[in-house]
């Protein structure tokens, strides 16, 4: 009897306090409801009386500027109220961005281009979400760029992408992913092909710059860029490359004074580099948990989260699709054709012969019409996953968000795999 008893907890929060909770147990759910006052989750206001349902893996903070009472129904693994938070510092950053937007509006120039950097698990994605939410709540339309190929908040892991943010993120599911602009990278770690990574970042920056020029509201609102937690050696070089490509004017460094000092030293004078502490609430994730969130993000792409999606499964003849991967092994310069550098091979389109090794791999469906187009720098329409390979009949079965036929026949192989256990 006692085991089935529903746990109901009511929390009263003073102004500037935060209720933090985590839900780790599988099959457990919990419901959050704002009873009185005002509160927000990572910058999205809670609606009084509305029930928000969280499932396993949720790590959430309910913050209040004015004070509030919330009710939590269900068993959480961790729940406590924190009085110390860096929220007022984060709000100051938003206020500074807002001032830059006002100037941009007046002078018809570009708004702030801000990049958030720092090691793993310091709350980079959360800070981006907060700043984007505060901006849309002020009527702005910023672009969110995600360069973190390990998690892939805009599409799925192994991609970089951009999204015009038109409304605050959903409290439970994050930003709505309508019409994102996505490029295929194919690895979960940028170090797997740094030449390709930098090429895609440059391309994404060009497209974002064009979009800003075409949309006055977005131009004034600017861009918020999320980055990878790899900040040493090659990772640092990639950050400085991204800053240059996007012509970033503000860098927020979370939790690492060394990185802060390196950026102050290396960035041109017009780039403001700001050090910010991380929130004590940010939860560190183990490698296993990271793999789980990666898997979860692919599962949600195909099956949805709260609103279920019903993906299709169908066979594709090998002859119906043209399969490629990006990057061939580096050859010594002496073996390269005249005028080509050894590293050019890393961004080369390489035909892949279908076979059993495709099983469980994700494939990006390119918007390119022919291999003669610039497939590497063309954005992708979506993703499919290979769930079976029949060598005898020369077919593979794919899981696809859309029914047959494939929207396009150029497919790009990702090293990332997904086991469809649905
Ligand atoms: P990565 O290393 O993957 O780039 P990150 O630095 O972007 O990580 P986040 O993803 O923002 O870090 O945060 C890690 C986790 O901590 C997330 O699940 C997030 O929901 C949670 N989190 C962030 N801030 C808080 C907070 N104040 N209270 C409770 N949980 C939080």
Image (cartoon, rainbow, N blue to C red):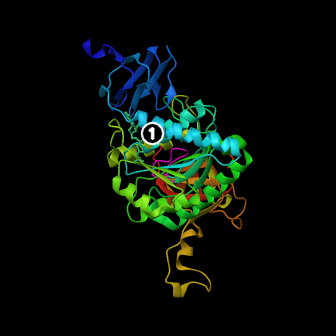
Quadrant of the snapshot with the N terminus: top left
Mark 1 CB lies closer than 8 A to ligand 1? yes
17 in the magenta segment: no
Q: Is residue 142 visible?
A: no
- Front residue (pair 387, 390): 387
Query: Which of the 4 quarters of the picture holds residue 79?
Result: top left
Q: Is residue 209 visible?
A: yes
Q: Position of residue 2 (x, y in %)?
A: 25, 13
Residue identified by numbered label 1: 126
- Front residue (pair 393, 367): 367
User: Which segment did they paint magenta?
Assistant: 148-158
Residue in the picture at 55% in, 74% down: 345
- Front residue (pair 404, 52): 52
155 in the magenta segment: yes
Residue in the picture at 56% in, 62% down: 354
Q: Position of residue 170 (x, y in %)?
A: 53, 30
Residue in the picture at 73% in, 59% down: 369
Query: Which of the 4 quarters of the picture holds residue 66?
Result: top left
- Front residue (pair 146, 406): 146
Q: Position of residue 342 (x, y in %)?
A: 53, 79
> What secondary structure is found at the residue carrying circle 1?
helix
Label tally: 1
Q: Main secondary structure of the magenta part?
A: loop
Residue 214 shown left or right of residue 393 in the figure? right
The relative height of residue 417 versus residue 310 in the rendered view (above or below) is below
Residue 129 shown left or right of residue 292 in the figure? right
């Amino acid at each position: 009897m006692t085991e089935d008893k529903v746990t109901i907890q009511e929390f009263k929060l003073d102004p500037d306090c935060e209720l933090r909770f985590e839900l780790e147990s599988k099959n457990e759910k919990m419901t959050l409801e704002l009873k009185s006052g005002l509160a927000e989750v990572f910058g999205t206001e809670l609606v009084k009386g509305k029930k928000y349902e969280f499932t396993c893996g949720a790590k959430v903070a309910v913050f209040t500027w004015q004070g509030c009472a919330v009710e939590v129904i269900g068993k959480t693994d961790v729940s406590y109220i924190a009085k110390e938070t860096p929220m007022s510092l984060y709000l100051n950053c938003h206020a500074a961005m807002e001032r830059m937007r006002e100037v941009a509006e007046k002078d018809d120039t570009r708004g702030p281009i801000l990049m958030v950097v720092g090691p793993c698990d310091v709350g980079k994605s959360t800070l981006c979400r907060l700043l984007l939410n505060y901006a849309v709540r002020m009527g702005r339309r910023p672009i969110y760029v995600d360069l973190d190929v390990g998690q892939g908040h805009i599409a799925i892991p192994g991609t970089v992408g951009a999204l015009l943010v038109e409304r605050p993120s959903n409290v439970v599911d994050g930003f709505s992913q309508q019409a994102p602009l996505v490029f295929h990278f194919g690895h979960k770690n940028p170090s797997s092909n740094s030449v390709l990574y930098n090429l895609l970042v440059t391309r994404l920056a060009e497209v974002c710059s064009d979009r800003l020029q075409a949309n006055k509201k977005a131009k004034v609102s600017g861009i918020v860029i999320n980055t990878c937690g790899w900040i040493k050696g090659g990772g640092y070089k990639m950050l400085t490359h991204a800053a240059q490509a996007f012509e970033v004017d503000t860098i927020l460094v979370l939790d690492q004074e060394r990185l802060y000092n390196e950026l102050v030293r290396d960035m041109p004078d017009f780039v403001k580099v700001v050090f910010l502490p991380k929130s004590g609430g940010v939860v560190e994730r183990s490698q296993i948990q990271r793999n789980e969130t990666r898997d979860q993000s692919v599962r949600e792409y195909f099956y949805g989260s709260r609103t279920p999606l019903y993906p299709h499964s169908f066979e594709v003849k090998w002859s119906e699709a043209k399969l490629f991967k990006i990057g061939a092994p580096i050859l010594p310069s002496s073996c390269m054709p005249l005028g080509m550098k050894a590293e050019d091979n890393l961004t080369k389109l390489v035909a892949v012969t279908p076979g059993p090794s495709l099983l469980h791999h994700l494939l990006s469906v390119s918007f390119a019409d022919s291999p003669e187009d610039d497939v590497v720098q063309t954005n992708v329409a979506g993703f499919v996953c290979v769930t079976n390979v029949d060598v005898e009949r020369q077919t593979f079965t794919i899981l696809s968000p859309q029914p047959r036929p494939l929207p396009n026949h150029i497919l790009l192989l990702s090293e990332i795999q997904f086991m469809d256990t649905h």
